[in-house]
Image: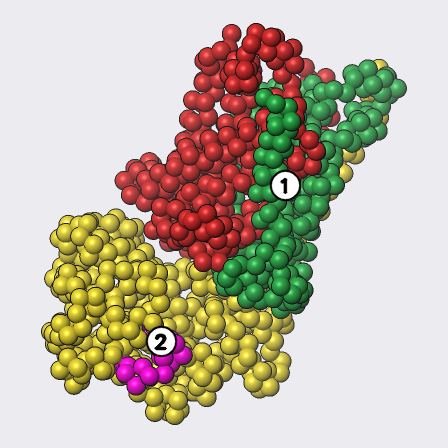
Chain colours: A yellow, B green, C red
Amino acid sequence: MPGAGAPAGGGRRRAIRRIGWGSVALAGSLAGCGRGKADPEGPLDFWAMGREAEVVVELLAAFRARHPGVQVRVQQLPWTAAHEKLLTAYAGDALPDLCQLGNTWLPEFSALGALEPLDERLAAAGIPRDDYFAGILDTNLMPAADGASRLLGVPWYVDTRLLFYRTDLLRAAGHAAPPETWSQWRAAMQDIRRLAGARSYGVLFPLNEPDPLFALSLQQGPVLGEDDTRGAFSQPPFRRALDFYAEVFRDGLAPPMTNTQVSNVWDEFARGLFAFYVTGPWNIGEFRRRLPAERQKDWAAAPLPGPDGPGVSTAGGSSLVIFKGSRRKEAAWKLISFLSEPETMQRFHALTGDLPARRSAWRAPALADDPPSQAFARQLERVRAAPKIPEWERIFQEMQLTAERVVRGRQGADAACRQLDAWVDALLEKRRWLRSRRA
Amino acid sequence: MNPRLAVWLVNGLLAALAASTLFPLLWMLSASLMAPGASTALPTPILPPSPTLENYRTLFGGIGMGRYLLNSLLIATLATAISVTFNLMAGYAFAKLRFRGRDAVFRLLLGALVIPGQVAMLPLFLMLKPLGLINSYGGAIVPAMASIFGIFLVRQFARGIPDELLEAARIDGAGELRTFTTVVVPLLKPIVATLAVFSFLASWNDFMWPLIVLTDASLHTLPVALAGLSREHVQDNELMMAGSVITVLPVLLLFLALQRQYMEGLLAGSVKG
Amino acid sequence: MTRHGAAAWILAGPALGVIAVFFALPVAAGLALSLTDFDIYALADLSTLRFVGLQNYAHLLQTPLFWQALGNTLYFVVVGVPVSIGLSLAAALLLASRFARWQPFFRTALFAPVVTTAVAVAVIWRYLLHTRYGLVNQGLAAIGVAPIDWLGDPHWSMPAIIVFAAWKNFGYNMIILLAALQAVPRELYEAARMDGAGALRRFTDVTFPILVPTFVLVGILTVAGYFQLFAEPYVMTQGGPLRSTFSMLYLMYEEGFRWWNLGNASAVAFLLFVVIFCVSWVMLRFDRDAPGRR
């Protein structure tokens, strides 16, 4: 058909061209759609979690007064989703300029090469390193490829675990001072229990919280060996900690419950269900708020007992980090500087109850004259970092699942630790391979 | 059975079922109008003791729900427009045009319906990264620009177009593409409505993919924002209910307006041709 | 056969292109990914990527968590699908009955949950199932049943999600079954009634055999959908309590987006696909060999 040939051919080519350009334009516009980032003159992107994010917004007024040219946009992440969001953002090149990072997450982001070293900036700002609690600062020092240590985050607030206890129950059982060694602790718990009777315990170790067991194991020795590439949970140090932990349950000195099974921790503490509670700084405020008025004189805090004397505890808390891909590092550092000033840290503490990372910030009366906070200050001088490997978070959770099985009698300690070591070895296989490659 | 009893029984059961499907939705609306904290009273109120729009004010004010609503609207509309166009073209081609490999390709497409979409999500995420589509509207829209089910629907419908009409157009000298735009598309209008409803609903309700690909909170769609809020504000029942209302109401209204087309499309898709 | 060759490819091209690039390619890449040890080290530095063959699969099959996820998913499918289809059938029978009134209204009302957003209604149901303030427990209390911790008790969490899922999507299959029911010729029922068959006999001898292919279709669609359980546990229980609602896709999401073991996560996704495929195939064979046919 004469008519069908020529117009169809020309029309076809035109159609192809049109569709082709249309798709390119579409793809281009869609790619640009909704991305307003990476503008050096734009606001700083600051991601923070939970309550801290809300409080930062309040502190920003003073920051704006000092640095009028720097706009800050705070995005609040819920703790339950923050880890995923950060890694997804890394994979998608969508990280913010600076961020609050739990210090146990630093090894992961260090392995990803995502963090900007802050050694020079800290020195240039005149902030003395030894003003920070040594164990806490250590969690921010990551080994670099050349073997040297670099500071990849600035500690913001700190967190650790120690003993909250009922002073009246302890005194009634014949112990004037809080225990300082494991044997004193066990003896105190047994005496309290003997006095109080069947349905009471010495200590609450929630079975879904790994921190108490981990603190005990830190007091004994390392849980990973061979440059953090193999599990050492079957070795004596962790076994001693696990045995102490499991025996506490076996002797009826701790209830085998998770923290969701205890209906209301503060009510039970006030009622004397348990006399000791290994927990963190937020409970200073919670105890004051939730315990009845007549109980307020009956509780205190003390550093964690160790095998032979006051022991170390976990080095937790959050740091402030700058991501390498940020185009506004100078401005980001200004915000970090501001948040690291002792006065700002004190205001932050007043608003959140989070303990400051710098010793000079502790001179405020709210901290210096507060006995429970001072117990934390003493403990913070004795904290040790967790293994600085990206896989630690998973190992940490698995360690507690293993301990729970042992405590509930589902598995013997020997078999459980061997199983845990095998699992850890498999998990760290790639790390071993990378290490052997580098050697 | 006594017919009168049967009528009571059947309609009674239907009413009970309808009550069970509608009640949660109505309670959602009711709770959204309660003052914060009013729903955690015993016994739990079914109607708001003193209705207030405060939750909506909070949502659109401090939390910026308007932004998420806009994102959902934008993404769903764009995805629908593009996918309707592409599916229409492809469905007609598979129905009425003869080309090499047509039947084989179509069978392949049908087989691919069994593959769950999540298998593709992780690699797709890695693929979109160098294209710069992560964390952008494009990333959410691009995978939805065509769908096998949509092509299938159009093909089913287009098979019913009388060949004589197409022949007549060809005899008049129109090329295939001209025939498509001038003759076929008007005839496909009914299925366009069905396709549009399906597409819009699927895109609006999509959760896992936008959760993964949209990292910036300012780009979140309503389901993603709601899931995030529900983890943060576990205690704020009334606020969450208001968020659910905002998420669910647009698609419910769309469905009510176009239910005939939706049901027809559903049935057409389930009758394997 | 190539009469319309070029025009056809222009028309079909964009859609096929999208499907090829944004679906087929990633699926193939996913298979390839599952044969590597892509993890956080590889994310940072691609040179650390290693080809490991079927090691991810072997490792998964030895991981207790995998079997728990598979078990939970199977529990959800084996119990949830019959519940959902049973409810759909009951609703369809009621709607198709000659005694039913106000059919359009009931049809719309029963279908409404299908179009709602899963996340939004999961949020509603989370509150309805609250142990103290939820209306479900208060309703149960009215008939003397003690409050059940629906979302906090590992024994009740999956049943709660099964009930929720049935509520949400029984309307979909109801419409399909309704259309099939309405296509059954009235004469067959008349003949059966004249033979003295009661309502139940009419159902088993007339309705059911004709409906088998529709049942198979509905069954396959629902089973495939139910295997993809994710949004409900994500919103209502975070995979808990004690991992009782941890599904295969939740495992994939955690492995992939929490720990960034993309190799493992892709292996989970493919194993899920294999399971769905096998189950669908078995169900299709059932259609072919169904009693009452030919």
Name the residue tied to disc 1: C112
* Residue A226 is covered by the magenta coloring: no
Q: Residue at x 48, y 53 (%)?
A: C138
Q: Is residue B155 above or below residue C55?
A: above
Q: Nearer the viewer, residue A227 or B238?
A: B238
**Residue A177: which numbered mark, if any?**
none
> Considering the numbered disc 2 on the image, is that residue within a helix, a strand or a loop?
helix
Alpha carbons under labels 2 and 1: distance apart: 47 Å
Q: Position of residue A184 (x, y in %)?
A: 12, 76
Q: Residue at x 48, y 72 (%)?
A: A51
Q: Is residue A349 above or below residue B77?
A: below
Q: Residue at x 69, y 18 (%)?
A: B98
Q: Residue at x 59, y 31 (%)?
A: B9
Residue C263 visible at all: no
Query: Disc 1 residue type?
Result: Ala
Label 1, residues with CA under 10 Å away: few <14, some 14-19, many ≥20: many
Query: Disc 2 residue type?
Result: Asn
Q: Tell me the subunit letter for badge 2.
A: A
> Considering the numbered disc 1 on the image, is that residue within a helix, a strand or a loop?
helix
Q: Is residue A249 above or below residue C37?
A: below
Q: On the picture, is C294 further left or further right than B31?
A: left
Q: Position of residue A2 (x, y in %)?
A: 86, 17
On the same chain, marks 2 and 1? The answer is no
Q: Position of residue C147 (x, y in %)?
A: 41, 52
Q: Which residues are magenta?
A: A279-303
Q: On the picture, is A116 further left or further right than A394?
A: right
Name the residue tied to disc 2: A283
Q: Nearer the viewer, residue B225 or C14?
A: B225
Magenta stretch: helix, strand or loop mostly: helix
- Of marks 2 and 1, the one in the foreground: 1
